C-alpha cells in the first residue's frame, strides 16, 4: 500500500468514525475467507459494515473522533464493525461470535462512551431501531383499532341502532310481564 492510498484510507476511516453511532472492535484471527464474507454480508444486511485496517492507520483515523476511546483495543489482528444504528453492528457481531468461537469481541464505543465486551453484548440484546419503530406504530394503532371495535360492536351484535337493547325490544316488542309484580 503506497503513501497516497494510506492517506486516503485514513481520511475515509476518519469520516466513518465521525458519522457512525457505534463501533465494535473484535479479533478475527482463525476465520477463513468464507466466514469473513459471511460476516460482511450479515453486517451489510443489518445496515452495518466491517473494515479490516492496519491498527496504526486506524489509530491515526480515530484521532479527533468520539470513538477514540477504542484505541487501546487495537492490538493484534482486529477488525472494526460500525453502524449508524446503535444496535445493528453489536447485534450481528454478538450473533456471529456465538456461532464462531475464533471471533472474539474486544469492546467498542457508542458515541464517547467506551464499551467492554459485555457492554457490546448488552447493547446487542436491545431491540433495533426498526423494531422499536414497529412497536411504536403498533402502540399508536392499537387504541384506534379498539375504539373502532367498541363503536361497531353493539351494532354488529344487536342489529339495532339503539345500543344496549336486544333486537326484539328494539322492534317494539315488550317482554311479557309476570302476574306477581310485588
Image: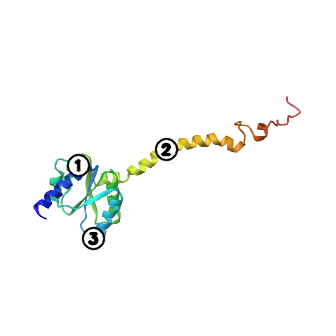
Name the residue carrying label 3: 33
Residue sticking out furthest to the left: 3
Q: Earlier in the sequence, mark 1 or mark 3?
A: 1
Q: Is residue 67 left or right of residue 176?
A: left
Comparing labels 1 and 3, the label whose residue is closer to the camera: 1
Q: Earlier in the sequence, mark 2 or mark 3?
A: 3
x and y percentages locating residue 62 in the rendered image:
18, 51
Q: How far apart are marks 1 and 2 (CA)?
A: 34 Å
Name the residue carrying label 2: 139
Which quadrant does the N terminus fall into?
bottom left
x and y percentages locating residue 152 in the rendered image:
64, 42
x and y percentages locating residue 174 in the rendered image:
82, 35
Q: Distance between the residues labelled 2 and 3?
A: 44 Å
Q: In this view, does 170 lie to the left or right of 134?
A: right
Q: Distance between the residues labelled 1 and 3?
A: 29 Å
User: Callout 3 environment at 10 Å: few (<14), some (14 to 19), or many (20+)?
Assistant: few
Residue 80 visible in the shown view: yes
Amino acid at each position: 500500500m503506497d503513501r497516497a492510498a494510506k492517506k486516503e484510507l485514513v481520511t475515509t476511516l476518519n469520516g466513518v468514525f465521525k458519522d457512525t453511532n457505534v463501533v465494535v472492535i473484535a479479533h478475527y484471527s482463525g476465520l477463513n475467507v468464507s466466514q469473513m464474507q459471511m460476516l460482511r454480508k450479515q453486517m451489510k444486511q443489518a445496515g452495518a459494515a466491517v473494515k479490516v485496517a492496519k491498527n496504526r492507520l486506524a489509530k491515526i483515523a480515530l484521532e479527533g473522533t468520539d470513538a477514540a476511546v477504542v484505541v487501546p483495543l487495537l492490538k493484534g489482528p482486529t477488525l472494526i464493525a460500525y453502524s449508524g444504528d446503535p444496535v445493528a453492528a453489536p447485534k450481528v457481531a454478538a450473533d456471529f461470535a456465538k456461532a464462531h468461537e475464533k471471533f472474539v469481541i474486544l469492546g467498542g464505543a457508542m458515541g464517547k462512551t467506551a464499551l467492554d465486551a459485555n457492554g457490546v453484548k448488552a447493547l446487542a440484546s436491545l431491540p433495533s431501531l426498526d423494531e422499536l419503530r414497529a412497536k411504536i406504530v403498533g402502540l399508536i394503532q392499537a387504541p384506534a383499532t379498539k375504539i373502532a371495535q367498541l363503536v361497531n360492536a353493539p351494532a354488529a351484535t344487536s342489529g339495532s341502532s339503539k345500543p344496549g337493547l336486544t333486537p326484539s325490544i328494539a322492534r317494539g316488542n315488550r317482554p311479557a310481564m309476570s302476574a306477581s309484580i310485588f
